[in-house]
Image (spheres, rainbow, N blue to C red):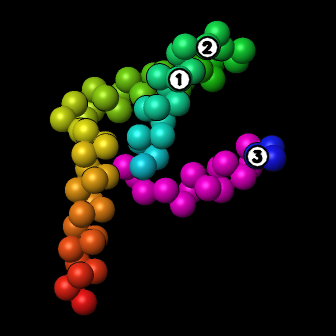
Amino acid sequence: MTVTFDEVKRLAARLTTNEKARLIDELADEIQQEPPSLPDAWQRLFALSADFRAAHPQADVTAQLEADRNERQRLLERC
């Protein structure tokens, strides 16, 4: 099954901000391992990832996601 770019964009729109940041970070790391075919687009992605890391050096996206899930679970258990 082939997934189109538009389908990926629609799915990404459903992610939380933290999940989007994590996705961008992971994709940037993955893409750096491959020779880019669209240098300008890759450079913008790497710059965005670097800017995010510089703006939020304390941000641990994975830890935040886990904390959010635990908080949601705690709230659900109270109902």
Task: Examine the image and state in which quarter residue 11 appears.
Answer: bottom right
- Seen as rendered, the residue at the extreme bottom is 79
Q: Secondary structure at mark 2?
A: loop
Q: Earlier in the sequence, mark 2 or mark 3?
A: 3
Secondary structure at numbered mark 1:
helix
Find disc 1 in the rendering and name its residue.
30
Type of residue at label 1?
Answer: Glu
CA separation, marks 1 and 2? 7 Å
The crowding category of the residue bearing disc 1, from other C-alpha atoms within 10 Å (few below 14, some 14 to 19, many at least 20), is few
> Looking at the figure, which quarter contains the C terminus?
bottom left
* Total numbered labels: 3
Give the mark nearer the N terminus: 1 vs 3. Answer: 3
Q: Which mark is residue 63?
A: none
Q: Position of residue 17 (x, y in %)?
A: 40, 52
User: What residue sits right under mark 2 in the picture?
Assistant: 34
Three-letter amino acid code at the position of disc 2: Glu
Q: Secondary structure at mark 3?
A: loop
Answer with left or right where residue 20 lies relative to residue 74: right
Crowding at mark 2 (Cα within 10 Å: few <14, some 14-19, many 20+): few
Residue drawn at point x = 41 percent, y = 42 percent: 21
| Residue drawn where x is 57% and y is 52% of the image | 12
Q: Which residue is mark 3?
A: 3
- Can you give x and y, in whole percent of width and height, for residue 29 in the image? 47, 22
